[in-house]
Amino acid sequence: MINRKVFITGGTGYVGQHLLPELARRGHEVRALVRKGSEAKVPAGCHTVFGDALDQASFSGKIMPADTFVQLVGVPHPGPAKTKQFRTIDLASVRASVAAASEAGTDHFIYVSVAQPAPVMKAYLEVRAEGESLIRASGLNATILRPWYILGPGHRWPYILLPAYWLLERLPSTRATALRLGLVRLKEMVRALVEVVEHPGKGIRLVEVPQIRQSSG
């Protein structure tokens, strides 16, 4: 395994706080972008880089020598009431990150998007699709992961849906949709991210829910 130099935005969030220590444990050099005052949230073994994920100029010169850029910024607990935040935070951050990564000549860009298409959360899906379009237009080698909902601490209410999912995944008429919009556990999401960090590809690669669940880490 080649040890990677990884630059991460959103690293102190729901997924990032579990991903950072795991990458460091596996021997990768991890640098997390944080605003001043949040440095205590960066785990031991990781380096702190100060900047604003919504402002490209604040961090574009600090990405190197990273070969991998992981974009995790997003509004916590997305919901219909947060439509404006999806554009001012989620979209603004991926726009800044793609531009900065392109300028730095990053080898591999990793983006956590969302499962598509879906019958709900239209505004959220639109913003994530715009993020994917920015990545495709950039020419970067990129991996786009498309979870639907990530089960974990503070995100447990969908556990009540697991029996329904079990049934829907076994009916021919609903199987494909149920798998695409399936629930993934936080440990599966972290494992999938570690795997794509360690095994970058060329061009654009999509990792959907079934592949996230099957990631070996």
Image (tube, rainbow, N blue to C red):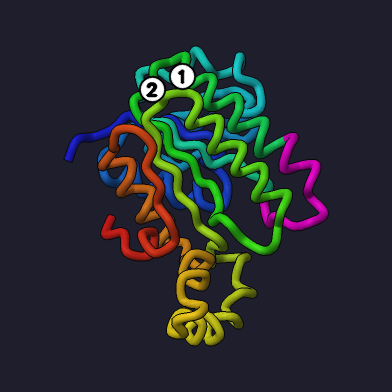
Q: Position of residue 38 (x, y in %)?
A: 62, 35
- Depth check, front residue: 61 or 111: 111
Image side of residue 162 versus residue 211, left or right: right
Q: Position of residue 13 (x, y in %)?
A: 57, 47
Which quadrant holds residue 203? top left
Instruction: Please tell me how many numbered marks the rendered image carries.
Output: 2
Give the class, few, some or many, for how many residues have Cα within 10 Å of label 1's Cα (few <14, many ≥20): some
> Residue most toward the front?
173
Residue 162, position as x, y percentages in the image: 53, 81
Nearer the observer, 35 or 195? 195
Magenta span of residues: 76-88
Read off the residue under disc 1.
102
Residue at point 32% right, 64% down? 214
Q: Which SS does the magenta portion mostly show?
A: helix
Residue 75 lies, with reference to residue 38, above or below; the image says: below
Is residue 171 highlighted in magenta?
no
Q: Identity of the amino acid at label 1?
A: Ser
Residue 49: % across, % down: 51, 24
Q: Secondary structure at mark 1?
A: helix
What residue appears at the point 27 percent right and 42 percent down from the top-left corner?
A: 198
The residue beneath circle 2 is 106
Which residue ends up furthest to the left in the rendered image? 1
